[in-house]
């Protein structure tokens, strides 16, 4: 299940029993557009949403990986634009994504925030309007000066969300401690998998190792592609 599918499922839909937060629709036109368009059933606002999730083994991420500028373009006539990423995989100090988010009012949400909302049964209804959560960067932009625009503002955002949920600091921290423990456990499982894979590879015969290396480099596929192209050129008429 992809990260965008999980984001779609994480947006509570309207039900007769519980009301609902947003009525989300997965965007089938995956190229050059946001993955989710959602409209409030109670307060007549709409948002576009996209989600990212990176492998734990991937450390080199740049601002283009987060597509914050694209989120501004995809917003269109909708009121808000929301990007959801793992909390601990956002840049920790400075990055252009923070300045871009502030300038274009792109909400840098997280899977952890979504989990806390769900665990606290936050549900929009006629009396409750959660649009302030999708407008956090507009709030932050009023207090962050130009020199600090590219600095990480997650700690300030944490405080806004904590106060919105009426949680004390200890309660809020406990959620993140639980999430960290789960991530560490997952990481240790992945480490064990790759360590076992190393041991398996060390048992390969020379022939098996060569075969696996050729397959991983996809050399035969590269040769085939080149052959097909030059054969096409040989038959091409000017």
Image: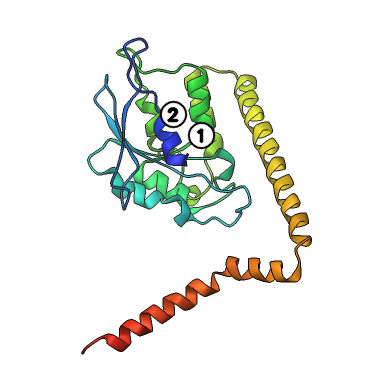
Dot 2 lies on which element? helix
- Residue 118's x, y, as percent? 48, 22
Look at 53% across and 28% down and name the residue there: 159
User: Label 2 neighbourhood size at 10 Å, few (<14), some (14-19), many (20+)?
Assistant: some
Which image quadrant is residue 80 in? top left
> Is 235 placed above or below 219 here?
below
From the image, which quarter does the C terminus lie in? Answer: bottom left
Q: How did the renderer colour the structure?
A: rainbow
Horizontal placement of 59 versus 45: left or right?
Answer: right
Residue 146 appears in the picture as rendered:
no
Sequence-wise, the earlier of marks 2 and 1 is 2
The answer, for residue 103, to whether it is visible in the render is yes
Residue hosting label 2 = 10
User: How many numbered discs, if any?
Assistant: 2
Report x, y in % for residue 132. 38, 27
Find disc 1 in the rendering and name its residue. 111
């Amino acid at each position: 299940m992809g990260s965008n599918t999980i984001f779609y499922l994480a947006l509570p839909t309207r039900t007769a029993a519980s009301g609902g937060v947003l009525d989300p629709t997965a965007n089938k036109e995956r190229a050059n557009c946001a993955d989710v368009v959602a409209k409030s059933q109670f307060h007549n606002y709409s948002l576009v949403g996209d989600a990212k999730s990176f492998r734990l083994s991937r450390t080199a991420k740049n601002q283009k990986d987060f597509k914050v500028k694209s989120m501004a373009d995809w917003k269109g006539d909708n009121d808000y634009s929301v990007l959801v990423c793992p909390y601990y995989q956002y840049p920790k100090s400075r990055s252009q994504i923070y300045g871009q988010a502030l300038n274009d009012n792109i909400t840098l949400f997280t899977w952890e925030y979504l989990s806390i909302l769900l665990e606290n049964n936050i549900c929009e209804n006629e009396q409750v309007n959660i649009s302030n959560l999708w407008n956090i960067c507009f709030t932050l932009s009023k207090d962050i000066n130009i020199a600090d625009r590219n600095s990480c503002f997650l700690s300030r955002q944490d405080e806004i969300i904590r106060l919105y949920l009426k949680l004390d600091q200890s309660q809020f921290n406990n959620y993140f401690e639980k999430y960290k423990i789960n991530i560490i456990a997952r990481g240790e499982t992945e480490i064990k998998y790759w360590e076992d894979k190393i041991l398996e590879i060390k048992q390969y015969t020379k022939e098996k190792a060569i075969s696996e290396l050729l397959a991983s480099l996809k050399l035969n596929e590269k040769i085939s592609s080149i052959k097909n192209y030059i054969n096409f050129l040989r038959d091409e008429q000017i």
